Amino acid sequence: MNQAGRIILSGTFRDAVYALSETPSSTWQNEDGSWGGAPGTSKFSGTFHFNLPEGTTKVYLHFKFYHDCSNAWFSSSLTGLNFTGGMTSTCGYTEGQVLSSKPAYGGSNYVNEDCVQIFESMSGNNRGDGSVEIRSQMVGYQETSHLNGIVATDCALPDKIPAEAIYEAIDEKSVRVTWQMPKDNGTVYYHKAESYLTGSTVRLCESNITQNRLTSGIAGYYLVIDDAKDTNVTKVNGHFNTEPHTNVTADKITKYLHVAAVDVAGNIGATTHFTIKETEVPWKIYTGQLIPEGEDGNVAPSSEERCWYVRADGRTPITLKHQAYLKGVASLQYQLNETIYETRTQEGTIARNIIRTPSSDTAVETVRTDAEGLIYATEGTTVLQQYPYSFTVRSDSGKSLTGVQKFTITGDRSGQRIQVIPIAEADSVAGKIYSLHELDEKNKITLIADGEPPVIYGMEMLENRELIDRRDGKVNVTITASDAVSGVKEFYVNIQNTDNTVSKTYHPDADGSIRMEITEDDALFSGDFTVFAYACDQVGNETEISEGTTEFGLEADIIRIREPQDAAFRCGESGILTFTVWGYADRVEVIFPKEMTDLCPELNRIFDYRDKPGYRITEQLQFMVPLYTPENENFEVTVKAYKGDKKLEDHPVISVIGVKGSVLEDLRTRLR
């Protein structure tokens, strides 16, 4: 063991010269073959080879002796111990490698003192072949079948870092350069094992030679950033970095990043040079918030955040303004080119409307490209239908690109929720660079398509109702409107009387209903009038229902002039027929029964109102029951009112009674 208590050598031996007899006695067998006598003695000597670990200053030996005889005593002693040793070194180079050479003119020799640790030289002239001895790094002797702790140093350089790197913008001034981790080559070592008889230097056999490559692995990188193209990185001028990337400030001055890999053993590989130009950095792309703009009231905000209702009629366009910008410097080789509207439906389908703007000179502050200069493309089944109106504006020296595009949505999408996400793209030498999708998601909007107009209820009771006769009783109408998607924005009922030009507009009550009594004694409801119901939703889908009808009324009655004023007459008595007609009648006819007109044809009358219409007209007609009218019978007077092709009739009744004859008898009585 060394001073640290570490076992550096262990071994065993067995003395088999003497043996106990086969009898129960305790005598020993002597060397001459006899039994008995003093106990036998034996000696053992051997040579052990071992390596001293670095730093060892003292060696301690610990011996253990034991025997397997239970009836014999045993003693042991160490009579002698001798240490010899030396130092071995390794050159670290491969077989056959020539480190240096020099012709040996005149029998002289040459030693490269930088490549050896110990050498001897003799002055004078010598002839003959020279020789060199290369020792093994480690030669060990032990009885176990394995060997641990072999020192094998990695002496090979790592590979050069590939010249391809990834440039990723961190902010508007910094760029992260990421390179590939190179291969660490490692050093090849050869090992061989030989077997010997115990305590002998006679070799029994030898093993095959194994080849083992020790690779320590990449520990990190040495970096140098300057304005020189070919700076060589060393441990002295380089800054050590463990990660295969670093951040570099990019500005108008071209910079160079010099990187070399170093392995765990400290071997530094060749230097790779990366160029950093601010005009070649793929600066990050950002998009702005989408906001829809409508026409003719076809866009309305919903109660949800960033959500709008839009009219889905396939005709009325909505305008989507797309804004994108580079957070860095734009160049002719790297600038914004595509404004993309990505849509997602409730079914999960994804589509894109792509508008491409060709690259332009970034020295020009503002460049507008109209529709004819743009390139259009789609991916998937698009929900937004392209409308023939679009343009883009590139500004801020090419760093910003604003796109204005109009779209329509067809009616079959009514009720669907459509997400629209703004995406921007820039062409670069490395390929297409897109805006950060997780940030684009924050600028998305939701459009709710509304292609259905409101529904109006209550007008059906006026449908095909040409005439409203107020004698049938009151007619009350309740009209409502509803919309299943965006909701009702405007609702009213307008009544226009075509006979007297009177009109009136009704608006809903607090519960959203409009109530009317269209048989009300009002000029508005007298004669021909039209009920017009209108409803509009939040995005301008309209419903209009118009129903025309005629409110036409006729009432007639007959009374006696004399008391009592009932309808019981005697022949020769006078009465009054009163009728009232509503609804701007053209004429009214009064027709007495034939039994009376045969006696007095002048009883029938016609009242013509075409030159003096009125929403309500009352007339009184005085008449006399003719003498000799059959008594004790009831007679109907027919009153007819006409308005266009519409007609109303009323039939007041005249009762003729026989009470002591006619009025002539009263007259005769008085003359007597």
Image: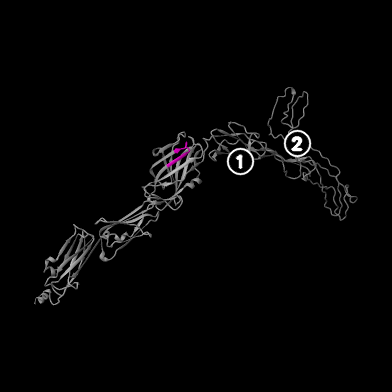
Check contact, mark 1 vs mark 2: CB within 8 A.
no
283 lies left or right of 68: left
Could you tell me residue 37's position as x and y percent?
A: 91, 50
Q: Which mark is residue 243?
A: 1
Residue at the front extreme of this rendering: 671
To which residue does mark 2 refer?
A: 88
Classify residue 663 by image quadrant.
bottom left
Residue closer to the observer: 124 or 216: 216
Is label 1 or label 2 in front?
Answer: 1
* Amino acid on which disc 1 is placed: Glu
Classify residue 599 by image quadrant.
bottom left
Could you tell me residue 622's position as x and y percent?
A: 16, 67
SS for tag 1?
loop
Magenta span has 401?
Answer: yes
77 relative to 94, above or below: below
Residue at the top extreme of this rendering: 106
65 lies left or right of 555: right
Quadrant containing the N terminus in the rendered view: top right
SS for tag 2?
loop
Q: Earlier in the sequence, mark 1 or mark 2?
A: 2
Q: Judge whether residue 106 can be spotted in this image.
A: yes
What residue span does the magenta drawing correspond to? Answer: 394-403
Q: CA distance from mark 1 to mark 2?
A: 39 Å
* Amino acid on which disc 2 is placed: Thr
Classify residue 378 by image quadrant.
top left
Residue closer to the observer: 531 or 45: 531
Colouring mode (rainbow / by chain / secondary structure / one colour): one colour
107 relative to 600, above or below: above
Q: Residues within 10 Å of mark 2 (few under 14, many from 20)?
A: few
